[in-house]
Amino acid sequence: MSTRIPPEVWDHIFEIATHVPYILIPEIFDKSTFIGDAYNDIYLPALADDFATKRNLVLVCKQWWHLAIRYLYRALLIRDTRKLLSICSTLQSYANGKGAVPGAKPLGWWTERLDVEIRGSATDGKRLVDVIMCLPNLAIVHLDFRIWLPRVLYEPIMRSIPNALRQAASSLRVLDWSTRSSDPATLLGVRELLAELPQLCILRCQYMPWMDGLIPPNILSSVTTFAVKEMLITEGGIPSECRLGDRRVNLREVIVNAGWNGLESWSIFMCLYGTFLTSVHLTMFDGYSDALFHHLAMIKQSCPNIHRLTLSMIEFSYLSRVALSLPPIEYLGLSMFGVLHNEMESESLFSALAILKDTLPTLRVVQLTHPENVDRLLTAHHDVAIGALETDLAQCPFRIEDHDGNLLLEGLKVAR
């Protein structure tokens, strides 16, 4: 007797087999604090690996092809413009009914996420617009172009992308526009696009789209997380028309990138919106610790309602007693990048936690947010970590967690 598995069971199987955590709605909102380079470094490689699994599934047999093909196109990661022609041809063919089961939705209808990271030359970049036009239900878009093309060839492509994204305006929830382009026409197109995204929750831009620092009311009423890689507000001070009045403001989280932008501009921004914020992520690209102190002082002064703070820095040794004059937060996330995580950096980390134990009574959780930092403590610096946690931090009033939310000490004991 033959047994037929119902299509809905196959759907559940394919859903589990192709699942990558934190890359689709709603799971991505749990990682809103890290949207940008830190998030992309961790999750885009997982997305690329998952594509190989999906490709194998659709090649098993004709039945699996029709059942699993929509999972293959659920999230598109494009890193080579030479592949745009084949992707575009496939999407357009299915949109015209070729290759699809009669009555089935076209492939592009299922695409929820689009990541485009292009380096070097872009020989066929204009086809990206044609691909976007086949994706009406996009919820997450991440664009990062670093293309070596004359401006006369490059800028027309960039100017046409915001217009193409308008056809997904009603579904777009996350926009990471990390592309470097100072072309006025492109920036105008981005601003006009943003005005038409009623469901947008997370916005990240390379440059501040509004040079006077005033975010339009429609953005303030929908966006909860806002990140700018290079903040620049051109006004010498806070604009006179900055009073927000009765505007509905949903902005709760800001990602501050220090070192590529001025403290003065961020201070203006925080004076405008700091009272609404409950979470701030601060990434320190500067090679000196004084910048951390000045940015934390700005946050402490401007954000009276903050209860979550996340710090990413080049060295844990930046966490001196002077720098650790923190606002009364309940959650602190810490990560280090840029240099070798050696034993001295591990000692600096736990010395900082010992200071916080005695100086920040509101703190409930400290989390090491980057997997590589946790791995170094579990392996190369295991003795330093477990020694600190079992002595100086033995009676610690706050939890010390790894990137997955587990107690760090428990992981260290298992790794013994």
Image (cartoon, helix red, strand yellow):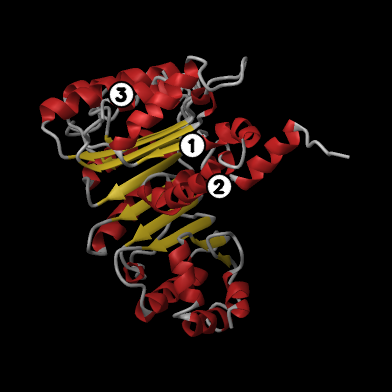
* Distance CA(mark 3)–CA(mark 1): 18 Å
Residue 146 is situated, as x and y percent measured from the top left of the image, at 22, 41
Labels 1 and 2: the sequence-earlier one: 2
**Viewer-closest of 126 and 24:** 126
As helix, strand or loop, the secondary structure at mark 2 comes to loop
**Viewer-closest of 359 and 182:** 182
Residue 402 is situated, as x and y percent measured from the top left of the image, at 54, 64
Classify residue 157 by image quadrant: top left
Is residue 212 rendered to the left or right of residue 355?
A: left
Identify the residue position indicated by label 2 in the image. 20
* Distance CA(mark 1)–CA(mark 2): 10 Å
Identify the residue position indicated by label 3 in the image. 161
As helix, strand or loop, the secondary structure at mark 1 comes to strand
Residue 368 is situated, as x and y percent measured from the top left of the image, at 48, 63
Tell me the residue at 57%/70% (across/down).
408
Q: Which mark is residue 75?
A: 1
Residue 309 is situated, as x and y percent measured from the top left of the image, at 45, 53
What amino acid type is highlighted by mark number 2? Val
> In the displayed structure, would residue 381 be above or below residue 71?
below
Within-10-Å neighbours for mark 2: few <14, some 14–19, many 20+: some
What amino acid type is highlighted by mark number 1? Ala
Which quadrant: the N terminus?
top right
Labels 3 and 1: the sequence-earlier one: 1
Can residue 335 be seen in this snapshot? yes
